[in-house]
Image: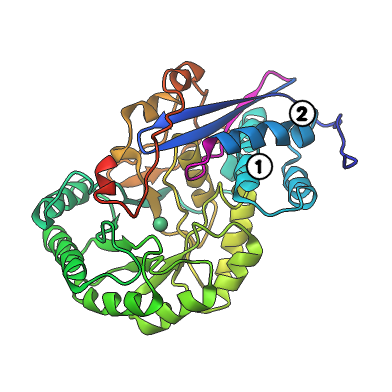
Amino acid sequence: MPDLPKHDTRACRITKVTTYVVGMRWRNCVFAQVETDEGIAGIGEGSLEYQPKAVEAAIQQLAARYAIGRSAFAIEKLWHDVLRNEFMHSPIINSAAAALEMAMWDIAGKALGRPAHDLLGGRVHDVLPAYANAWYGVGKSPAEIGQAAAAAAAKGYRGLKFDPFEDAGRDPDRASIRRAVEIVAAVRDATGPDVDLMIDAHGRFSPASAIAIARDLEPADLFWFEEPCDPENAASLAMVGRGMKTRLATGERCTSRAGMAGLLETHEIGVLQPDIIHVGGILEAKKIAAMADAYYTPVSFHNPFGPVATAAAVQLDACTTNVFMQESFCEYDVPFRFDLLEHAPKPENGRYVVSDRPGLGVGEFRPEVALAHPWEPDAFLPLFTDRWSARF
Ligand SMILES: [Mg+2]
């Protein structure tokens, strides 16, 4: 057992951590409510693709090891202790730590009466343009997906992201590539020339197939091509970057600052997409954004989960210079998403307006709403099965 200060002398000592796993149609989200001896509570989120029970157990373990008895202001020390002492680098540990870390920012802000972004350098953006995701699952034909795109663009989003490749594998046949090209062309026709279109391949392709497909898609003038191949081998990903004209985007599955450095060192990353939860929290994500800035590379935080993660993203966006667009699933998610918090963030005319409320700006968490939507064993999105996007 590491020698940790169980009775920090500063304010707002953590007394209790309560976890909630909430079934939200195609994924379960994980929340941690953190209470303190000053009566101030904060909320954090540790959602991770398809392992909610593991993250929930990890939150409880980390809370006992590192959080209970510690000041909610000791954020850097908590993350440092977790990073060093847990020994293995793991997205489950990172996501659990992030749930505690976000809640600590929420508590610290509430204790001081200031929004979290004021504690992280202060605001540089008042509003954040958003791009919509999950808007396209309703359609089946290219024309129907085009209609869905026009409807989403009409809400005011700067951009739309989608995966037009359905269940395609490493090296798809000509017919399935042609169908994807038809879908992308229909979306471009429906939205006109001024909407940014981003496609996400979710790591489907071999590097050579990805390059060929990127060339087929050039007429659509895409803003970025995300995870054209699996992102763990940075050199293979960079091969795709060199072989196509479109910006290469990646980062959501990279869970360490060292891994992010390896991606940036390829000099092929057009947009870095850290997931605030998966990297270990708001402060670690801010450091990674600064590292990307050393390569003149913008960041756009990955944000497919619940309303607390979105609130954390908006707080971090507000105080990060090299952010330019925020991913948003909000308007295409379960309606009770907006009931989980007293003030759940929601885009207005396709933009997030930065809140001045204290902490994460969400007010109080509503446990009764979380408990009304418990863990769903079937909340899972296998991306290599037919019509997976229909679950959106
Ligand atoms: Mg993605």
- Stretch of the chain drawn in magenta: 38-52
Q: Which residue is mark 2?
A: 68
Amino acid type at circle 2 is Ile
287 lies above or below 372: below
Query: Where's ligand 1: which quadrant?
Result: bottom left
Q: Indicate whether residue 45 is drawn in magenta.
A: yes
Q: Position of residue 49 (x, y in %)?
A: 48, 45
Q: Mark 2, residues whose alpha carbon is within 10 Å: few (<14), some, or many (≥20)?
A: many
Determine the CA span between mark 2 and mark 1.
13 Å
Numbered label attached to residue 97: 1
Q: Nearer the viewer, residue 14 or 232?
A: 232
Examine the rendering and report whether any part of residue 71 can be seen.
no
In the rendered image, residue 320 lying in the magenta stretch gets the answer: no
Q: Position of residue 198 (x, y in %)?
A: 31, 62
**Residue appearing at x 29%, y 47% in the figure:** 388
Residue 373 x %, y %: 42, 22
For this rendering, which residue is in front, 204 or 332?
204
